[in-house]
C-alpha cells in the first residue's frame, strides 16, 4: 500500500470493467483521493461513476501494481499502453474501462503490441481478479512476461 510510482489496476467486482491509473505518490494516498472523490462526487471520477451507474462494487484489495516506474513520462506511457490494449477503440467502452479518459496519447504503431500487453495484464492481475471473473480470464494466459519493457 505504501508503494510509490505505480501503474495500478482495479477490477470491478461484478463485471469485466476495470480502472487503470498511475501515481507518483504512495498508492494509499491515491486510493484515499479516489475514495474522497467518490464520496463527495465533486470531481469526475471514473470508479465512482461506474459504481453509481451500474450499482457495481469494487474491492480495493483486488488492486494490482502493474508497473513500478519512477519516471513520470514513462509511467504515463505505460498507463496508456495498458488502457489502449484493453480498450483499443478511440472511444471509451464502459464495459472494458471505468476511466473517464484514456490518458496520454501514444503512437498508433503500439497497436501491434496490444495482444502481448493484454496477456501481460491478464497474467499480472489473475490472482487479484474477483472470483466469478478470474476463471474466464486466467484461461487465456499463455505467456510468462510480467512487465512492459520500454526503451
Ligand atoms: Zn462493473
Image: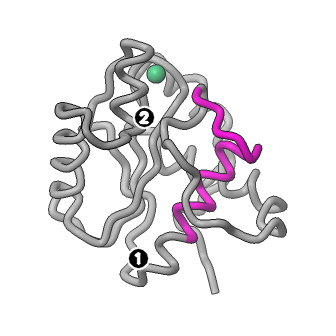
Q: The magenta stretch spans which residues?
A: 77-94
Q: Position of residue 63 (x, y in %)?
A: 33, 44
Check the picture and name the quadrant holding the N terminus: bottom left
What is the spatial separation of the Cα atoms under label 2 and label 1, in whole angstroms?
Answer: 21 Å
User: Seen in the image, is 48 located left or right of residue 73?
Assistant: left
Q: In this view of the protein, which residue sits in the foreground, 118 or 54?
A: 54
Q: Is residue 131 above or below residue 98?
A: above
Rendered image: mark on residue 69: 1
Q: Is residue 7 above or below residue 69?
A: above
Whether label 2 touches label 1, CB < 8 Å: no
SS at mark 1 in the image = loop
Q: Which residue is rendered at x = 52% and y = 79% of the image? A: 74
Q: Which residue is rendered at x = 65% and y = 49% of the image? A: 119
Outermost residue on the front side: it is 42
Q: Quadrant of residue 67?
A: bottom left
Residue 86 lies within the magenta run: yes
Q: Which residue is rendered at x = 76% and y = 51% of the image? A: 115
User: Seen in the image, is 32 located left or right of residue 108?
Assistant: left
SS at mark 2 in the image = strand
Residue at numbered disc 2: 11
Check the picture and name the quadrant holding the C terminus: bottom right
Amino acid at each position: 500500500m505504501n508503494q510509490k510510482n505505480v501503474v495500478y489496476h482495479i477490477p470491478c467486482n461484478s463485471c469485466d470493467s476495470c480502472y487503470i491509473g498511475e501515481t507518483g505518490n504512495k498508492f494509499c494516498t491515491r486510493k484515499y483521493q479516489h475514495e474522497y472523490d467518490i464520496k463527495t462526487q465533486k470531481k469526475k471520477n471514473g470508479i465512482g461513476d461506474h459504481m453509481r451507474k451500474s450499482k457495481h462494487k469494487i474491492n480495493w484489495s483486488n488492486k494490482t501494481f502493474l508497473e513500478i516506474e519512477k519516471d513520470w513520462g514513462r509511467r504515463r506511457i505505460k498507463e496508456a499502453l495498458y488502457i489502449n490494449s484493453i480498450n483499443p477503440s478511440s472511444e471509451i467502452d464502459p464495459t472494458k474501462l471505468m476511466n473517464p479518459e484514456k490518458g496520454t496519447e501514444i503512437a498508433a504503431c503500439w497497436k501491434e503490441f496490444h495482444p502481448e500487453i493484454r496477456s501481460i495484464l491478464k497474467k499480472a492481475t489473475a490472482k487479484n481478479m474477483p472470483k466469478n471473473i478470474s476463471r474466464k480470464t486466467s484461461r487465456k494466459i499463455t505467456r510468462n512476461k510480467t512487465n512492459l519493457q520500454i526503451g
